[in-house]
Amino acid sequence: MGLFFASYAFSEGNNIFVRSAVVIKNQEEYKLDANFDVRLSPELENVLDRGVTLPFTLDLILVHRKWFFWDQEIARVKRDLRLSYSALTQQYKVFDKYDSTEINHPLRERALIALGALRPFVVFHAKDLVEEKNYEVQVRFRLDPAGLPSALQIEALESNAWQLDSGWFRWTLVK
């Protein structure tokens, strides 16, 4: 089992912080169970409340570290989620493209908690690993500007208010 728990401090404005991330072996599969704290800027809150869907992406990379040569990438996983607001129902919706689940919340804060609380899912298989090798897990959660409507993509790339990214969190996988 690979385990990483982070302590963090909040900064003003927007950001994403990792609360916990763990890779758990379940028979022949390894699953990621992660929890992120997502904070939106007032500008992003405004855009969301006007009906723009915010696309988020979880990236995971499993790497075999080599001290004498280039690192070897063993697995790469991408998981897409969407956060939206419906003025008609006055509900925030978190949509997970991985398993096509939808969760509705009347409050933005509850929707952000649901967005960051990823249910465990398979990220790689035991057959991908060699027992005597060391592996590093790298994970990040971010707002994905490429999934925004075209009119907002340039603004998202230029404005700090649109920069939501946990940064890469790394830990050694304990088999």
Image (tube, rainbow, N blue to C red):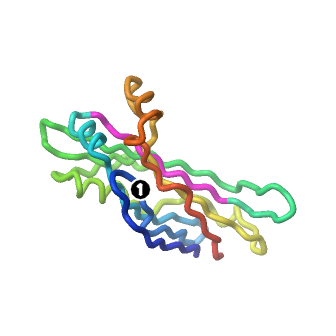
Image location of residue 22, percent across then percent down = 51, 70
Tell me how many marks there are: 1
Point out the residue furthest to the top here.
151
Classify the position of the N terminus by image quarter.
bottom right
Tell whether 174 sits left or right of 86: right
Quick one: 80 or 54, which is closer to the camera? 54
Q: Which residue is mark 1?
A: 16
Point out the residue furthest to the right here.
68
Tell whether 82 sits left or right of 168: left
Residue at x-position 30% and y-position 41%: 44
Classify the position of the C terminus by image quarter.
bottom right
Residue at x-position 49% and y-position 51%: 58
Q: Which residues are magenta?
A: 52-62
Tell whether 79 sits left or right of 89: right
Residue at x-position 63% and y-position 71%: 173
Q: Main secondary structure of the magenta part?
A: strand
Residue at x-position 22% and y-position 46%: 92
Point out the residue furthest to the front here.
12
Dot 1: few (<14), some (14–19), or many (≥20) neighbours within 10 Å? many
Image location of residue 9, percent across then percent down = 40, 67
Q: Classify mark 1: helix, strand or loop.
A: strand
- Is residue 16 rendered magenta in the image? no
Image location of residue 144, percent across then percent down = 46, 40
At label 1, the amino acid type is Ile
Q: Is residue 62 above or below residue 46?
A: below
Location of residue 73 by image quarter:
bottom right
Image location of residue 161, percent across then percent down = 37, 42
